[in-house]
Image: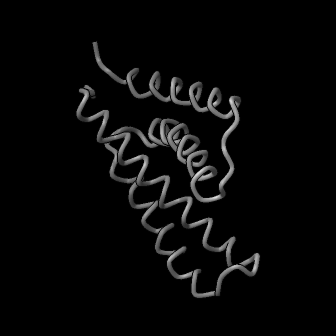
Amino acid sequence: MSLDLFSLGRMAGLFFVTAIAELLGCYLPLLWLTGKGSAWLLLPAALSLVAFVWLLTLHPAASGRVYASYGAVYIATALAWLWVVDGIKPLWSDYAGVALALLGAACIALGQRQA
């Protein structure tokens, strides 16, 4: 499968939306469990997790490669969530870890190009 710049950007955007769905699906039950929200939060949480699973199926590559590449985008999105939602600024080591993970994901995604 050949990846051009457009399809690589589409894949990254889809991974970002997928990560938001997964984070939201886990965060809402946490609010309920910690007493910061009602049990009604479990409904949108479940819908968000269903969306997360469906979004992962939209990628044409082999599932293992998709999950491996998605993991790096999830890490980056989770650290952005840490800053925006939790109000905790990431440390230099967080940025370094994200850079390494994204570099690894790029190797996986670009490595599927056929010569």
> Which residue is at a point 67% across and 34% down the rendered structure image?
94
The part of the image, by quadrant, that contains residue 72 is: top right
x and y, in percent, of residue 17 in the image? 41, 54
Left or right side of 84 for 57: left
> Is residue 90 depicted above or below 95 in this figure?
below
* 48 with respect to 32 (left or right): left
Front in this rendered view, residue 58 or 42: 42
Q: Nearer the viewer, residue 44 or 85?
A: 85
Residue in the image at 45% along x and 43% along y = 63
Q: Indicate the position of residue 43 as horizontal and vertical percent values.
A: 53, 82
Q: Residue furthest right?
A: 34
- Nearer-the-camera pick, 105 or 54: 105
Coordinates of residue 76 in the picture (x, y in percent): 55, 40
- Residue closest to the far top: 115
Pick whichever, 73 or 35, lies toward us: 35
Residue located at (44% from left, 54% from top): 18
Residue 92 vertical position relative to residue 52 in the rendered view, above or below: above
At x 55%, y 67%, the residue is 25
Q: Quick check: 23 above or below 93?
A: below
Decide if residue 82 is on the left or right side of residue 76: right
